[in-house]
Amino acid sequence: MASTRNKLPIFIIVLLIAFVFFTPLPHLSSPKFFIIDLIRMPLRLGTNSFNDLAALLRYRRLSKENKLLKEKLNFTTSQLVQLREALQENDRLNELFSFRKKLQYIVVPVKVIGKDSSNWTNTLIFDKGQKDGIAVDIPVISSAGLVGKIVEAGAKSSRAVLITDPNCRVSVIVQRSREEGILYGMGRNLCKLRYLPVGADVKQNDFVISSGFGGVYPKGIIVGAVIKTGIEDDGLSGYAIVKPACELEKIEEALCLKQ
Amino acid sequence: MRKFIFVAILVSIAIFQMTALNSIRIFGAKPEFLLITVIFFALKYGGRLGFWAGIICGLLQDSLSGLPFGAATISFSLCGFVIGNFNKTIFRESKLVQILLVLISCFFFYLVYYGILNNKLDILDFEMPVTKMAVSSIYTSVASPVFILILGKINQFLNKRFYLYET
């Protein structure tokens, strides 16, 4: 027989179990953002302080990296000029054949204020929400490539699932051979491109881009590069292991694409 | 004031779990520091405080992760309540006991998580990664004595200053 002191906890636990098991999943996420909004300020402060501290500890490596990046930037700038030239030529040709199709996106820059606290999912919490026009299923990109998509949006914050999350699926094509497949997150900063035909023309270092099928991700966004290929255990289809183009574990800012 | 400080400690631990603990991952797993905190309070102060620590830590864990809401709140509060009610009958100072309790609680948390996932299977579908479950549980339990020691020191310091848990 439970004592009076123990009755309240038992009552709350039973109530919680009933609430969780009988509430549909979309309604379950609303209390999350109430709590995130409550601790938004300490969360942002904590994340920023830790990032600063980690940067201080990595000072020597960062200094070297900075030098290297400056050299790369100079090289990239010269390449950019050439690419602009090619882009202008491409635009002219597109206009000529009336194929030009402009995708109009409004870009919302967001800052990462928190990373996933669990071992099971790879998600990020952003500092902007529905008030800034963020909604569910909006794709998230960075300068390096596809990051993921928004899965939950609160008033002032939102959560994005990364392409490396086991729950995330992206329809993609291999840029060189145009082989199509579905990209699954594997956790640990890698993805698996599945449902490739056996003997598909996919090689190491091939770039993988979004196919635009499904309507969530626009076509042509770089997703990553193939690092390994193989055939599934059942022998019916092939697969490729893809390393995401952007370093998802170190991401601090991203862009949300509003159509 | 005491309640506010108690919640502030738990929020700080949740932020620590989201930031610093990401840098000590092994095979993609990091220790479940919030769960260790719940067990610490349960062992030290009994079922009632263990339960409330479980509720707060669970709500924080659920909110700050992509897990379905409720998985951590249910399992943490249950662990805190049950362990706390037996804190006088077990040898709580033993490191082995602490490791075992954390290991069992961790497995219980993951099982509740998958129970809820299966309940909501219409939108989420992935196989139960037993290896990752094992790695996370073992890592959390092995690391628990160190975390419990640190928590003990912090708790001792705060208790002297604010008489936090006096009844």
Image (cartoon, coloured by chain):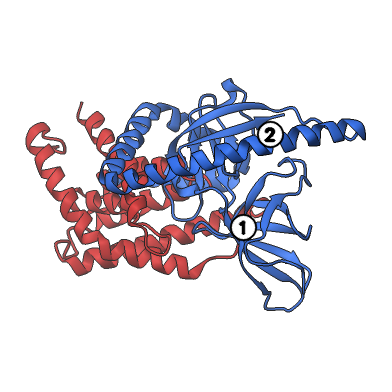
Name the residue beneath numbered marker 1. Answer: A225
Q: Quadrant of the N terminus of chain B?
A: top left
Asked if A115 appears above or below B147 in the picture, the reply is above
Q: Is residue A155 above or below residue A59?
A: above
Please report the residue visible at 23 percent of the width from the left and 63 percent of the height from the top. B98
**On the picture, is A31 further left or further right than A86?**
left
Q: Amino acid at mark 1?
A: Ala
Question: Observer-nearest residue: A180 or A130?
Answer: A180
Q: Dividing the picture into quarters, in which one does residue B157 lie?
A: top left
Q: Is residue B105 left or right of residue A170?
A: left
Give the residue at the far right of this rendering.
A97
Residue A117 lies, in percent from the top left, at 41, 47
Left or right, residue A258 beside residue B76: right
How far across and how far down the image is residue B105, in percent? 35, 60
Q: Position of residue A224 (x, y in %)?
A: 61, 53
User: Is residue A8 visible in the rendered structure shown here?
Assistant: no
Q: Residues within 10 Å of mark 1 (few under 14, many from 20)?
A: many
In the picture, one chain is red; tell me its letter: B
Name the amino acid, label 2: Arg
Q: Residue shown at 76%/68% (left/top)? A: A201
Seen from this angle, which residue lies furthest top? Answer: A131
Q: Earlier in the sequence, mark 1 or mark 2?
A: 2
Name the quarter where the C terminus of chain B is drawn: top left
On screen, A218 above or below B97? above
Q: Disc number at residue A137?
A: none
The residue wearing badge 2 is A84
Question: Which image quadrant is residue B58 in?
Answer: top left
State the residue at coordinates (37%, 64%). B137
Q: Secondary structure at mark 1?
A: strand
What color was chain A assigned in the picture?
blue
- Do callouts 1 and 2 point to residues on the same chain? yes
Disc 2 sits on a residue from what chain? A
